[in-house]
Amino acid sequence: MKGNGVSDSKRLYVGVDVGGTKVLAALVEETGAVLARERVPTPRDGGPEPVVAAIEKAVADVLAKGGVKAERLTAMGVAIPGVVDPKTARVVVTPNMSLTGVAIGPHLEKRFGVPVAIGNDCNFGALGEKWLGSARRFRSVLAMLVGTGIGGGIVQKGKLWRGAREAAAEVGHIVMQIDGPLCGCGNRGCLEALASRTAIERDLRAGIAAGRQSILPSFCNGDLSVIRSGAIRRALEADDPLVVEVVRRAAEILAYACLTIRHLLDPEVIVLGGGVIEACSEFIVPIVEGIVAADRLPGARDGGHVLLSALGDDAVVLGAVAQARKLIGRSPFKKRFHVMPKYPQLSKASFGQITAGEKTYKRDIFISVFGQIKKRDKNLAKETCGDSHVVGPKELEKVCRGGPEVLFIGAGNEGRLTLSDDGRRFLRQRSIQCEILPTPKLVEAYNKSPQRKASLIHVTC
């Protein structure tokens, strides 16, 4: 064993998400389990050298946090917000940072001594969702990530569709309004110029400058130069008229972009993610779902549904790891290289206790998708649902981290534990199956399931 309980027999990877404000590095097992994460700020000035140094620091820091040396790594994947050439591992262009022209792959290979796969960040986000997220059960997916800008990625049968110029799936630059607002790409009326956080910020500032009343400045300490997604969410929760109007319009435009994608590519699913969606999904997604469901052009079969990211911030780094595995011939989309987590066996479920693995628990527990056993915090259910016997989205977000295919809920000896309506919607939007059983009956179902699974177990009535 070396550092942090990592076995010598386990293959380890690093996934890196290079963003405009931060570089996120994750140390990842072949199962997809994230052992450690590290973030460092992305330098804004000084050319490419400080950015490359920040990437190196993020990787070195996450290795140190995980207690392993670079020699223990099998491969690395690096996601770049721009156009890259995967064959030469060179950055072609990064519009919002100083990496254009940098051969980042060869540099990192020399620095850390491992093979390095590089690619577009949104492409890798789509790959992550296909591997372990909401798109895991589907053959074709388009992921749309809505944040400062809007990007996309297309995966078909486990393979990225990158296009003839390595520029496919730039959904943020679909023109949605002729002669519309100027986009950062230089064109006008792009989806990104109408529905990204940058566009939402612009329209909110314009409304306030025109004299519209809004509670938003109080959530930004009076500084509207940067309006974070969290502040927008809080204003939506307060039913602020200006924010509701602006975000509703952005949601409608996103919905019609989803219809365009549906009619052009007809993927089995469209997965929405990114900071704006994560913060404001309760407001945005019902609008998108309603417009997409009202599509008058039917297909021959069911499909084309809109889902939410099941991986959140980890989607891009896990997609980078998936591509790194493909680079060395161990694609996670090939059955012979599919590595499952190790799960504890359940037994001895009786009123007030259950045995998981070698330990008996006399209180509620949950088991993560990677087999970790943790005590359930009933206060979370009480605070959000008013009753510890009701499971809602906040608790499910914790239990389902890592993207299980199926969630087993042990409802207690008398089956009293239930899902809230919001909880059912949470699981449906992330394509997570759910089985709710009396706890004694849960044991056999959980133990027999061959799927990637999580479980929430209530041990009393």
Image: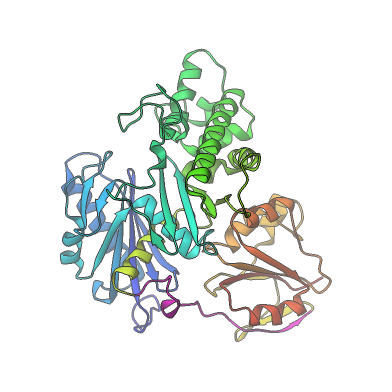
The image's colour scheme reads rainbow
Which residue range is magenta in the image?
330-350
- Asked if residue 347 is among those painted magenta in the image, a careful observer would answer yes
- 382 is higher (above) or lower (below) than 115: above
Rendered location of residue 96, percent (x, y): 28, 39
- Asked if residue 99 is among those painted magenta in the image, a careful observer would answer no
| Image-quadrant location for residue 75 | bottom left
Residue at image location 40% in from the left, 23% down from the top: 181
| Image-quadrant location for residue 184 | top left
| Image-quadrant location for residue 78 | bottom left
Where does the N terminus fall, quadrant-wise? bottom left
Asked if residue 90 can be seen in this view, the reply is: yes
Rendered location of residue 453, percent (x, y): 59, 71
Relative depth, front residue between 438 and 428: 428
Rendered location of residue 69, percent (x, y): 26, 73
Left or right, 51 with reference to 62: left
Left or right, 10 with reference to 195: left
Relative depth, front residue between 101 and 302: 302
Rendered location of residue 254, percent (x, y): 52, 37
Q: Residue furthest right?
A: 414
- From the image, give the main secondary structure of the stretch colored magenta: loop
> How many marks are shown on the rendered structure?
0
Where does the C terminus fall, quadrant-wise? bottom right
Relative depth, front residue between 234 and 74: 74
Residue at image location 61% in from the left, 24% down from the top: 241
Q: Residue furthest top?
A: 211
Asked if residue 64 can be seen in this view, the reply is: no
Left or right, 38 with reference to 418: left
